[in-house]
Image (spheres, coloured by chain):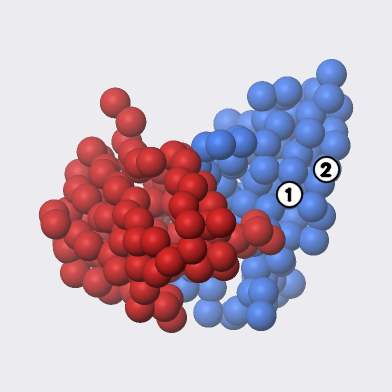
Amino acid sequence: DTAVSQTPKYLVTQMGNDKSIKCEQNLGHDTMYWYKQDSKKFLKIMFSYNNKELIINETVPNRFSPKSPDKAHLNLHINSLELGDSAVYFCASSLLTGGDEKLFFGSGTQLSVL
Amino acid sequence: DQQVKQNSPSLSVQEGRISILNCDYTNSMFDYFLWYKKYPAEGPTFLISISSIKDKNEDGRFTVFLNKSAKHLSLHIVPSQPGDSAVYFCAASGGGTASKLTFGTGTRLQVTL
């Protein structure tokens, strides 16, 4: 029943490893996002995909690679993890209507890089 | 450069009273504003939004006011309830869509009995 679900909820890993976070939405939305909330609690957009096409890429290191196999899924793969990647990552989705839109967020993935 | 600012990190209000959360923005291209509520270990949940063509939007106990000349918006919750205790984020976007939201750092609201 969860509208936007992301897994895993917690991810603890060593520096240098590669990891993935999965996201799925069952709302029929056409746009999906990844946001990062850092230690200072700033929520910042990383990527946005509309109908499987990348539309926003906010100067994120190319170690981060989003993959959208279909409109309902947007996964985030991170290569060569660094200490500074520790954060909470939120997936979100919306229906782009040209007005009155709102984002629906997943519950977040707490990534800890040791 | 913080384009959306919530200068009060926390606020405590008695149950039944009004809670007023404030947000300031600097980017004059922002024309769509949203408030989100967040409980611990959960994602932000949409509360209410307002576009720049309005100065007020109301939904039940929640009202958002927008003062474009001051680049300021506020969220009023009345009456406040203990279940309203959460972190509230203000967010803004340009182009009339929510496709690229800029968030404030949040205000933690505590509603006491």
Can marks 2 and 1 be said to lie on one chain?
A: yes
Where, by quadrant of the figure, is residue A75 drawn?
Answer: bottom left
How many other residues sit within 10 Å of disc 2, few (<14), some (14-19) or many (≥20)? Answer: some
Quick one: A107 or B94, which is closer to the camera? A107
| Residue B76 spot, x, y in % from top left | 71, 42
From this viewpoint, is residue A16 visible?
Answer: yes
Position of B51 with respect to A75 (left or right) is right
Q: Which residue is mark 1?
A: B107
Q: Chain of mark 2?
A: B
Amino acid type at circle 2 is Leu
The hue of chain A in the figure is red
How many other residues sit within 10 Å of disc 1, few (<14), some (14-19) or many (≥20)? Answer: many
Q: Which residue is mark 2?
A: B11
Amino acid type at circle 1 is Thr
Q: Classify B44 as above or below A86.
A: above
Position of B3 with respect to B110 (left or right) is left
